[in-house]
Amino acid sequence: MSGFFQMLRKKKELIPLIGFMAFAAAGATSASVYFLFTKPDVILNKTNNPEPWERLDPSKPQKLITINQQWRPIEELELVKRLTK
């Protein structure tokens, strides 16, 4: 570890690069954790919920921004869903 800090003392131009890389790694990690715990389409355990898309609320938008979204059930899909259950 001390060799790393000695290298930074010799090559000071690496300090911003390391700072940006640390910021990017922290942002990627925090975004992954956020999506893991808040988004319903991200699953960890497939045995308890093999089809998570069926639990989604169609009236709640899943995108970051939604413009003029109106949801109506499709008759053909509802028929297939009834026949397969």
Image (cartoon, rainbow, N blue to C red):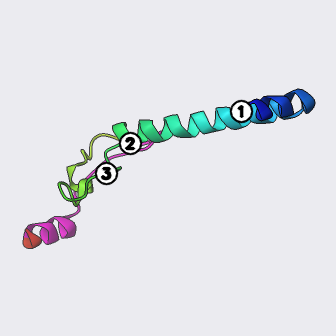
Mark 1 = which residue? 1
Question: Which corner quadrant holds the C terminus?
Answer: bottom left
Q: Distance between the residues labelled 2 and 1?
A: 33 Å
Q: What element carries label 2?
A: helix
Q: Is 12 situated left or right of 20 in this image?
A: right
The reply to whether residue 65 is visible in this rendering is: no
Q: Is residue 42 above or below residue 9?
A: below
- In-image side of 75 versus 4 (left or right): left
Marks 2 and 1 close (CB-CB < 8 Å)? no
Query: Image quadrant of residue 13?
Result: top right
Sequence-wise, the earlier of marks 3 and 1 is 1
Image spot of residue 34 (x, y percent): 43, 36
Residue drawn 79% across and 34% down? Answer: 3
Closer to viewer: mark 2 or mark 1: 1
Q: What stretch is highlighted in magenta?
A: 62-82
Q: Which amino acid does label 3 sit on?
A: Leu
Q: Please state which of residues 38 and 21 is positioned toward the viewer in this rendering.
A: 21
Residue farthest toward the front in the current orientation of the protein: 2
Label 2–label 3 contact, CB within 8 A = yes
Q: In this view, does 64 lie above or below 71?
A: above
Where is mark 2, residue-wise? 36
Q: Residue 68 placed where, x, y %?
A: 41, 43
How crowded is the residue under tag 2: few (<14 C-alpha within 10 Å), some, or many (20+)?
Answer: some
Tell me the quarter of the image containing the N terminus: top right
Q: Residue 44 carries which label?
A: 3
Could you give the CA–CA distance between mark 3 and mark 1, rounded to whole angstroms? 36 Å
Which kind of residue does numbered mark 1 sit on? Met
